[in-house]
Amino acid sequence: MQGVVRTLAQRSIRPSQALRPSLYRTWPAIARYNSTTQGPRTPSSATPTTPTASAVNTEPNQSTQTKRRWSGLRITLLVAKYTGFLIGSAAVGVLLIGAGVFVHDAFTYSERHLDRVPVSPLALNPKRGGPKNLPIAEVTLEDEENEESIKIAGKPRLVIIGGGWGAIGLLKTLNPGDYHVTVIAPETFTTFTPLLPSAAVSTVQVRSLIEPIRKIIARVRGHFLNGYAVDLVMSEQLVEVETVASDGMKKRLYVPYDKLVIAVGSVSSTHGVPGLEHCFQLKTINDARNIKRRLFDNFETASLPTTTPEERKRLLTFVICGGGPTGVETAAEIYDLCQEDIVNYFPKICRKEVEIYVIQSRDHILNTYSESISKYAEQRFNRDGISVITNARVKEVWKDKVVYTIRAEEKDKDGKVVKVNKEVSVPSNFVLWSTGIAMNPFTRRVSDLLPNQVHKKAIEVDAHLRVVGAPLGTVYALGDAATIETSVVSHILELVDEADKDKDGRIDYNEWQIMVARIKKKIPMAGPHLEKVRDLFERYDIDHDDSLTINEVATLLAELGNKITSLPATAQVASQQGKYLGHKLSKIARKEAILAANGISSDVGDDVVSKPFHYRHLGSLAYIGNAAVFDYQGLSLMGGLAAMYAWRSIYWSEQVSSRTRALLMFDWVIRGIWGRDLSNI
Ligand SMILES: Cc1cc2nc3c(=O)[nH]c(=O)nc-3n(C[C@H](O)[C@H](O)[C@H](O)COP(=O)(O)OP(=O)(O)OC[C@H]3O[C@@H](n4cnc5c(N)ncnc54)[C@H](O)[C@@H]3O)c2cc1C
């Protein structure tokens, strides 16, 4: 206490002295200030040049110096004060976060014991039935858990097959409580497919691209069934599902539905090329894992002293068959991996020997994008040493090589230049097959069940996404599994019947206008081709009698159908279709009572409650190795790092959950600071 009083007393008399002992160690400026004000130790006072000058100049010099030193001290103290505040608040922040985590953990840990969970006996022992006398999952294990479950169990059954972009779009917009929802999928998670090429080379972790389906369906209190849909019994509204029991045995059951949504996506097309079993594909998380393992195995084996130069070359040759977005992005990611990590952590010869080939059957890579984008990507690849081989067709794939043919010019024996198919063989231990999509086996089965389904790559749906030929309002399909019908001529009879008001078997201009309105409603994608109504009428009125005969109408509709291009098989389309269907099904559920009161069957509810599906193209993106390209309604943007960040931001914002958003952010930061994970797991 005495010490404190003394210190304060000293401070009131000579602040500099009171501060001295503690601050000297840390604040040299204060130390300097004290030493100059206390004694004759400054050079000026110690060695005055002339007595007179010294006597005259010392006073004002000392006072200016003192002022300067005081202001220096004040600034130093201010900096010290705010640094103290900053450190203090950071410490308090860390403490608060720590306390928050502690409180969260304390309250989220549950010691709840579930003693008696009500489960329906029918859920435990389902009754059998259907054409194959299989168990029918009419009641689920969760249906009697609580009041809400019991209420939902009485709602119409909505069964969604698949857990990808389309299904998730639907689940996110469906109103909770409108349906008893069941999702059937062989994988327990949904995958963010656009970043699979990044995951395949470890730029991001595969875990950052997946979200468990059970978490997504919790919002609508849905049920999840882990299995494959293998068949459909439309007459009894049953889906046949194959599941795997704990002993590895396959078991089948039926899942009943009131409304069914087919969202099973697609599989890779093979084009009948032999040897595809030696190729990798990139459609699922497992594909990304397998690719990563092979890439790093190749680099490790190539680093062994026992590996021959020829074998090293083969191991470090990566062949991508297909110059679409997936192939191009994978090539770019492999290149990035080599440039950013292989060169630093593997023998330099491994980086030097790497060769990346992109084999494309068309004139350009990224041929669904604008020409300028294709050219930009090709130039970029050319600069990076990625070999782009266009107008080439893969003939066969062997375990150790790829054989392709390419149109080349050669001189014949008469010296004339002729085009020939030249066969080229590329030794490789990694071949990615990414050449387009084909029908999923389940979609093929459904298509085979319906006589009017003729499309080769997907199941045809109408503008309301109802499967053409299936009982109205019960079976829908979307995403890669579906294609919206573009054939207008197949509707000619009903179109003529509706438009031909005077029933004279000819369509005059007024009736043609009615027909145009009807076509736009039935097949909205025809809309842009029907803007010049009068022109079309006059062009196809071959006999110039101011009316269209049935033959003239048929020609017009057939040519109109040829102009309509199908929607692309993209996540953008699937997601928009899912969201559209989710909104619509909820509307139908809400308006069911009104529809029934007005004598309208819920089967035709789609036409009554909702407009047909309308696709809004938001642009196409592709990553091409430290650069990205965008294509939006004829506007092409391409660029380096800034474009890459824009590309990342778009994918980041499109994440299915905040959890994957956070994981992705960490992955990009970790890759930036510590590089990729170079292990082969
Ligand atoms: C590597 C890669 C990159 C891509 N990049 C882009 C991009 O940048 N932008 C873009 O718009 N699109 C992109 N796409 C395309 C996009 O992923 C697809 O168009 C989209 O996934 C289609 O959605 P979907 O719901 O129809 O099918 P998917 O998302 O493929 O989902 C199908 C679901 O059905 C399940 N399933 C399959 N068979 C059955 C069955 N018999 N029974 C039950 N469930 C089944 C699957 O497990 C899966 O859950 C990319 C695709 C790939 C492979």
Image: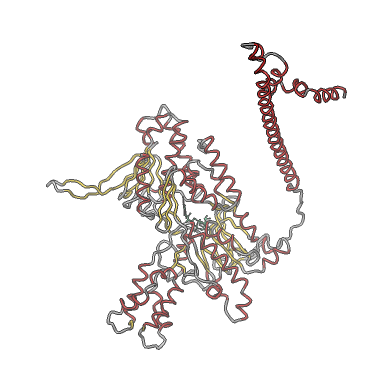
Q: Position of residue 340 (x, y in %)?
A: 46, 35
Query: Looking at the image, how many numbered discs can be counted on the residues?
Result: 0
Farthest-out residue, left: 414
Q: Position of residue 366 (x, y in %)?
A: 38, 51
Q: How is the image coloured?
A: secondary structure
Going 35% across and 68% down the picture, which residue do you hit?
A: 562
Answer with left or right where residue 116 lies relative to residue 65. right
Q: Quadrant of residue 426?
A: top left
**Quarter placement of the N terminus:** top right
Answer with left or right where residue 503 lies relative to residue 17. left
229 or 664, which lies in front?
A: 664
140 or 591, which lies in front?
A: 591
Position of 542 relative to 136 (above/below)? below
Q: Position of residue 17 (x, y in %)?
A: 76, 21
545 or 391, which lies in front?
A: 545
Answer with left or right where residue 60 lies relative to residue 506. right
Going 41% across and 50% down the picture, which residue do you hit?
A: 434
Q: Position of residue 59 (x, y in %)?
A: 68, 20
Farthest-out residue, right: 2
